[in-house]
Amino acid sequence: MKRARALSLVVALAVVTTVMAQTPPGSSAAVSFTDARGALISLPAKATRIVSLSPELTEILYAVGAGRNVVGNTTYCNFPADALTVPKIGGFSAKTISLESIIALRPDLVVGNVSAHGGLAPELERAGLRFAALPTTSFEDVYATLELMGRVAGDRATATALIASMRARVEAVRERTAAIPYAKRPMIFWETWDEPLMSAGPGTFTGQIMEAAGGRNCFADSTADWPVVSFEVLLARNPDWIMAAESHGEALTLERLARRPGWSALKAVKDGKVVLLDGDIVARAGPRFVEALEMMAKVLYPTLF
C-alpha cells in the first residue's frame, strides 16, 4: 500500500504539476502545481523566498539553482556549505520547528515532507503562508521534485540536465550488475540501531539503494520501514555484509560486534565485512543519492567498479 500510494503521488506530481506560462527565468508569470497532499499551490510568480523544513529538500533547492532563494532551513541542513549560513527555524521534526521564526522570514513558499510536516500546514496557512508537501520516498520522487523545484524556484534547464545525469549514473550501476542472478547477490544487513536491534525495510530510501546497488536487503520481506529484528532471525539469514551510517560507528566496530553474544558466528563478522557509509548521503532522498548508490556498489563489487 505504501509503495502504491507513493507511486500515485509521483504520477500526480508529474502529470498535474503545471507552469502557467513558458517564460524566461525571473519573469512574473503565475505558477501553479499540485503537491503530495493533492493540494493546489498557486504563486503569483516563481518563489524567491523559500523556507525548507528538510535537509533533502534544501539540497534539491540548491541543486536546481534555487539556493539563493532559500531564506530559512533546519539545523540539519548542512549541505551544501552555503546552507549552513542560512537562518535556522528549528530541527527536522514538527515539534522542534518554530512557526514564529518561519513567519518572521516572510517566505512566499515553505516546503516540507507529508509525514513529518503535513501537520504544520493548517498553522502555516492560517498565518497566510503557502506550504507545499513534496514527495521524496523513491528515486522517481526525487526526480519529480527536482523538476518541480526547477520550474517553481530555480532553473528548469539545470534541473533537466541534473535529472538526466542522475538517471544515467543509476542505469550504469544497474547495467554492470545486471548479469548477476538475484540469489547470488550479496546479502546486506543494515543496522539502524543496536538496542533494540533495528534495520531498514524495503520501503526506505536506504533499502532501495541496497537493491539498486546490486545487493539483497536482509530484511527485504519486512512490511515496516524500520523493523525491530531478532538476532536469531539475523543469524539464520547470515548476511554477507553489515553496513550502517558513520554516526552509528561506535557501536559497529569489529571488536564490539565480537562482544555481542553470538555475533562472532555471523559470516560478515568472521570475514570482517563491516562497512560504515556517510549517513547524510545514504539516508537522504536528495540529489546525492546517486553517490550513495555508486559508493555501495563499489563496496559490493570492487572488480566491477
Image (tube, helix red, strand yellow):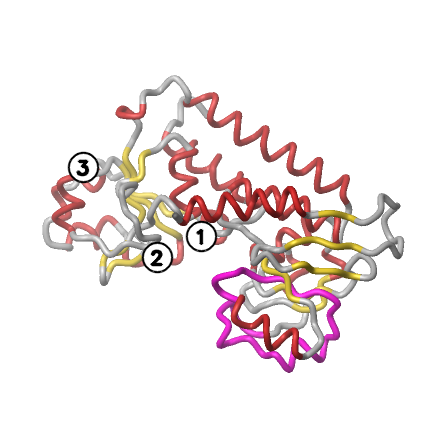
Q: Earlier in the sequence, mark 3 or mark 2?
A: 2
Question: Is residue 286 rendered to the left or right of residue 266?
Answer: right
Per the model, the C-alpha gap separating discs 3 and 2 is 20 Å
- Tell me the residue that label 3 is attached to: 267
Residue 85 visible in the picture: no
The amino acid type, in three-letter code, at marker 3 is: Lys
User: Above or below — where is 216 with respect to 119?
Assistant: above
Magenta residues, as a range? 90-117
How far separated are the C-alphas under marks 1 and 2?
9 Å
Does the magenta run of residues contain 77? no
At mark 2, the secondary structure is helix
Q: Residue at x 26, y 25 (%)?
A: 183
Q: Amino acid at mark 2?
A: His
Kindly state the secondary structure of the residue where label 3 is placed. helix
Task: Give the Cα separation between the discs numbered 1 and 3.
Answer: 24 Å
Q: Disc number at residue 88?
A: none
The picture quadrant where one finds residue 15 is top right
39 left or right of 26? left
Regarding mark 1 in the picture, which secondary structure is present there? helix
Residue sitting at the far bottom: 100
Find out whether residue 98 is within the magenta segment: yes
| Callout 1 crowding tier (Cα within 10 Å): few <14, some 14–19, many ≥20 | some
Q: Position of residue 179 (x, y in %)?
A: 38, 17
Q: Residue 36: x percent and y percent?
A: 57, 55
Q: Upstream in the sequence, badge 1 or badge 2?
A: 2
Image spot of residue 240 (x, y percent):
25, 35
Residue 90 appearing in the image: yes
Q: Mark 3 Cα within 10 Å, few/some/many (few <14, many 20+)?
A: some
| Corner quadrant of residue 110 | bottom right
Disc 2 designates what residue? 248
The reply to whether the C-beta atoms of the residues labelled 1 and 2 are less than 8 Å apart is yes
Residue at 57% x, 42% y: name it: 11
